[in-house]
Amino acid sequence: MIQTENLTFQYHKKGKNFHFPDLFLRHTEHLLILGKSGIGKTTLLHLMAGLLQPGTGSVTIDGICLQSFNNKQLDRFVGQNIGLVFQKNLAVWSLNVIENIQARLFFSRKKVDNALILNLLDQLNIGDCRLKKINELSEGQLQRLGIALAVIHKPKVILADEPTSSLDDENCKIVIELLIKQAKQTNANLIVITHDHRVKSLFSNSITL
Ligand SMILES: Nc1ncnc2c1ncn2[C@@H]1O[C@H](COP(=O)(O)OP(=O)(O)OP(=O)(O)O)[C@@H](O)[C@H]1O
């Protein structure tokens, strides 16, 4: 469950003050957030991920308010409970695929279970890339690794920022279906932000900022 209330945010004192609509997603519900470029989609996602602190308002995940934490507690909670899929993958280039996922589990303070990792990589169709370094992966394989890194620790909420922007129609559908499938398997909320209208038909629940 994720809920936002009365969220506002300003990058600079004299800059625009963003006011975001209240969101409420029950356990396992998904949401697509659409809106034109510059409207504040990524800003809202970063507020929900605890990467930015709101000027006013709150973000609550499974009854726990992010604004009640100090920085250390927030880092820990976010690392354990939120999965982020970025446009540009945040994998560590000096590690191979499986080592990247092991590191993700380690930093989330979750048990490193190689059977679980291999199973997920197989589901995402990158099992045969497990020993490859990041620079040896194709764009599509890198995108799938991004999903693996976002879901391996079974987060309560998966937040995806423009996960399909550089993909053709076929791969766009594949990536969204993979995210929905992974969210379903872990009973997570899935929130995708995009200005890619191709994604709209794949979600039953959407809002436009
Ligand atoms: N770190 C920052 N400092 C100052 N202004 C910022 C910063 N990040 C974003 N902005 C501004 O805030 C506004 C909203 O940005 P944001 O990235 O949230 O929009 P968006 O809807 O996700 O856009 P896009 O679809 O192009 O990614 C933009 O005008 C942007 O220039």
Image (cartoon, rainbow, N blue to C red):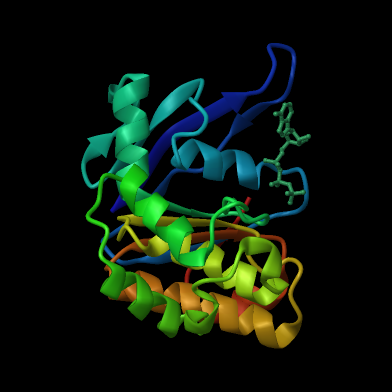
Taking the spot 26% from the left edge, 44% from the top edge, the residue there is 109
Quadrant holding ligand 1?
top right
Query: What residue is rendered at 65% in x and 60% in y?
Result: 162
Residue 182 appearing in the image = yes
Of 83 and 64, nearer the camera is 83
Q: Quadrant of residue 208?
A: bottom right
* Residue in view at x 28 percent, y 23 percent: 68
Q: Residue 83 or 104: which is nearer the viewer?
A: 104
Where is residue 71 drawn, in percent x and y? 37, 21
Task: Relative to 10, say whether 75 is above or below.
Answer: below
Q: How many marks?
A: 0
As drawn, is 208 to the left or to the right of 96? right
Q: Is residue 83 above or below residue 144?
A: above
The residue positioned farthest toward the bottom in the image shown: 170
In this view, the residue farthest toward the top is 13
* Residue 190 in view of the camera: no
Tell me where residue 84 appears, x and y as whole percent.
49, 52
Where residue 182 appears, as percent x and y from the top left, is: 39, 73
Q: Quadrant of residue 78 in the image?
A: top left
Q: Give the image quarter of residue 117.
A: bottom left
Towards the viewer: 147 or 184:
147
Q: Is residue 21 left or right of residue 172?
A: left
Q: Residue at x 67, y 55 (%)?
A: 88
Give left or right: position of 102 versus 139. left
Residue 100, image x, y percentages: 48, 57
